[in-house]
Image: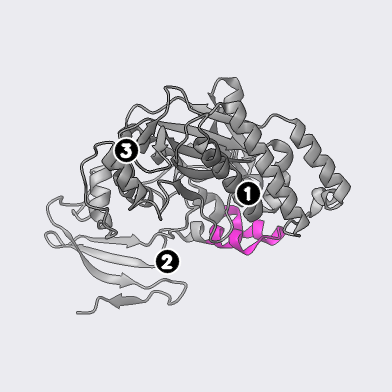
Amino acid sequence: MRSSPEVADIFRRYGSEYRKVHEMPLKDMRTMRAIETCRTSELGGHVGECDHCGHLRISYNSCRNRHCPKCQCLDKERWLEARKNDLLPIEYFHIVFTIPEPLRALALRNQKVLYGILFKAASETLKELAKDPRYLGAEIGFIGVLHTWSQTLMDHPHLHCIVTGGGLSEDGKKWIPCKNSFFIPVKVLSKLFKGKFLSYLKEAKENGKLIFPGHISHLKDNRSFKAMLSNLYDQQWVVYCKPPFSDAETVLEYLGRYTHRVAISNDRLLGIKEGKVTFRYRDRQAGDRAKLMTLDAFEFIRRFLLHVLPDGFMKIRHYGILSNRNRKTKLHLCKKLLGVKHQDQYQEEKEPWQDLLTRITGFDPRICPRCGEGKMVLKYFLVPLITYCHYFAKVPP
């Protein structure tokens, strides 16, 4: 029986009171409610019966919310499976673009606009410099994954990019590999990224796409906004490049750590006691040392909700030769140039979740947990309690 705390436990215990005293956007309320009801009778489920010993087991439905710590494992594995056919036998690099601290309050209140600018500025920076003959002179491919949190759950928007170590020549006739170190100097990346980001930010302000509530209300004044931009132009922006990956399998493993991660996983939570939540975090400024942090439950909830993305906002995006429109043409050509044997295109038909869970965990949910011999056969559907209370719908013949 589970004894370690979960984010859902915190929401169930303190969420109702939190909603009473805090004005919340609808997206945050929906996320809280989804996590609270995940794998409970409120979402319904089904009853399985062992065909050998007759044991009954109730399984409740998942909320499938992308911010839920319990609902990302299978989605992540399916996504990684789909990416296997995109990998090339080359080096890959990990580049991180970060929004500077003075912009974070503005970004938090304009998430869709600022996060969109982050994707646009970073992607244009990589594509433009890669096509420059001084650096590579080719069209690269990369995947961008947005994260918005720090280890302590504070707002820290940054973009992880997994970039091909080389690209397709302009005429499409050859593959141009990069050198051992990343082909674009980090300082060049940082300077161009800063210029593009601030240019798009200024444009958003001029077009009335930004709001300035609360303690950033002074930025509504054009002079204050221009002064902020001037200060940001004078700063050095952080763009970080990690060493290349050794092989395609390492790329997949690394991607798995980033693509479907949420602000905090349940295994980092240590306890909920007397209105306080304790969790583990890594202190980057202390050599990545593991430490403990204890927050008031309301403050924990507030920080968690900072990272609920706008409805419909895509946190994973593909560019260049890895983009959806180029996957069947330019990526196929790159494989041919690199001597990769032709493989059938990845089929969109999903692997049954039972098979997927068995493959990645070794646990087969179809085997009876009591006798270990029989198989669990669907007997009843459980209708969600939010619709009908204590009602069992029998499986149709």
Mark 2, secondary structure of its residue: helix
For marks 3 and 1, the one nearer the N-term is 3
Q: CA distance from mark 1 to mark 2?
A: 37 Å
Q: What's the amino acid at mark 1? A: Ile
The residue carrying pointer 2 sits among few (fewer than 14), some (14 to 19) or many (20 or more) residues within 10 Å by Cα, namely: some
Q: Is residue 5 left or right of residue 391?
A: right
Dots 3 and 2: beta carbons under 8 Å? no
Mark 3, secondary structure of its residue: loop
- What secondary structure prevails in the magenta region? helix
- The quadrant holding residue 159 is top right
The residue carrying pointer 1 sits among few (fewer than 14), some (14 to 19) or many (20 or more) residues within 10 Å by Cα, namely: some
Mark 1, secondary structure of its residue: helix
Q: Position of residue 391 (x, y in %)?
A: 37, 76
* Front tag of 3 and 1: 3
Look at mark 2 in the image and give the residue it sits on.
Answer: 43
Look at mark 1 in the image and give the residue it sits on.
Answer: 117
Q: Is residue 76 left or right of residue 358?
A: right
Q: What's the amino acid at mark 3? A: Leu
At horizontal 40% and vertical 39% (from top left) the residue drawn is 169
Q: Nearer the viewer, residue 319 or 387?
A: 319
Q: Position of residue 209 (x, y in %)?
A: 72, 59
Q: CA distance from mark 3 to mark 2?
A: 42 Å
Label annotation for residue 88: 3
Q: Split into 4 quadrants, where in the image is the C terminus? A: bottom left
At horizontal 27% and vertical 44% (from top left) the residue drawn is 360
The colour scheme applied to this rendered structure is one colour
Magenta-highlighted residues: 13-33
